[in-house]
Image (spheres, helix red, strand yellow):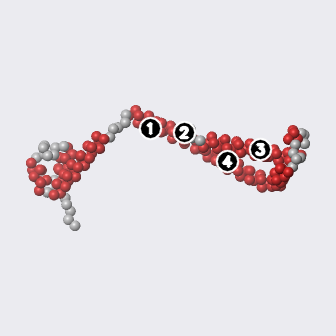
């Protein structure tokens, strides 16, 4: 394989980069470029790249230094706030997971009460024995129906609270 290299390439490239080509460079270098195809190619590529560089620099408008600094400060603050909120989010997720696990464990542990509550719910539309005023009686916890009502009321309050917490956690300001 034949290598295409000329000792004058560096001189041609330096003349183009410094802006001396073709007026301020010597006649010997110009004559060499007209005879040497390698140096002619170097000249062509260097001039093309130099024109592209000048065109690209004329198109670029750099923002003010104060604006760049301000944006960097705002980004650093935002990233610091995100880093600070990560442990809190992890604890919230862990608390939610442990809460669900605890609820399932409680339901398994007290399955007899869960089945009683479910049977009470099935009989609720047919039952006329439910007394809302009996909630405040001293025998409140003694009746299965009142205990079931309290459980339904508690579950509804928990669902309402959970939906509010999820809305607050997932909404973006």
- Which residue in the protein does label 3 denote? 154
Question: Which numbered disc, 4 or 1, marks the residue that appears first in the sequence?
Answer: 1
- Which residue in the protein does label 2 denote? 81
Decide which of 9, 58 is in the foreground and name it. 58
Question: Badge 4, how many Cα within 10 Å: few under 14, some, many 20+?
Answer: few
Q: Where does residue 20 sit, x and y in percent of width and height?
A: 16, 44
13 displayed left or right of 95: left
Question: Which numbered disc, 3 or 1, marks the residue that appears first in the sequence?
Answer: 1
Kindly identify the residue that appears in the image at 12 percent across and 50 percent down. 29
Decide which of 156, 66 is in the foreground and name it. 156
- Which residue in the protein does label 4 denote? 96
Decide which of 124, 20 is in the foreground and name it. 124
Measure how far apart labels 4 and 3 are at the Cα level.
Answer: 17 Å
Residue 10 visible at all: no
Measure how far apart labels 3 and 1 are at the Cα level.
Answer: 49 Å
Question: Which numbered disc, 4 or 2, marks the residue that appears first in the sequence?
Answer: 2
């Amino acid at each position: 394989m034949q290598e295409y290299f000329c000792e004058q390439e560096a001189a041609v490239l330096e003349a183009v980069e410094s802006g001396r080509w073709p007026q301020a460079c010597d006649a010997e270098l110009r004559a060499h470029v007209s005879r040497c195809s390698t140096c002619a190619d170097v000249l062509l590529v260097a001039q093309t790249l130099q024109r592209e560089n000048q065109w690209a620099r004329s198109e670029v408008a750099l923002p003010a230094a104060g604006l760049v600094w301000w944006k960097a400060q705002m980004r650093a603050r935002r990233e610091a706030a995100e880093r600070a909120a990560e442990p809190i989010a992890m604890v919230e997720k862990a608390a939610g997971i442990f809460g669900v696990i605890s609820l399932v464990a409680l339901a398994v542990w007290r399955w007899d009460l869960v089945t009683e509550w479910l049977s009470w719910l099935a009989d609720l539309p047919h039952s006329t024995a439910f007394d809302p005023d009996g909630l405040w009686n001293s025998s409140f916890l003694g009746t299965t129906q009142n205990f079931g009502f309290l459980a339904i009321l508690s579950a509804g309050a928990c669902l309402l609270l959970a939906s509010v917490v999820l809305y607050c956690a997932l909404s973006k300001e």
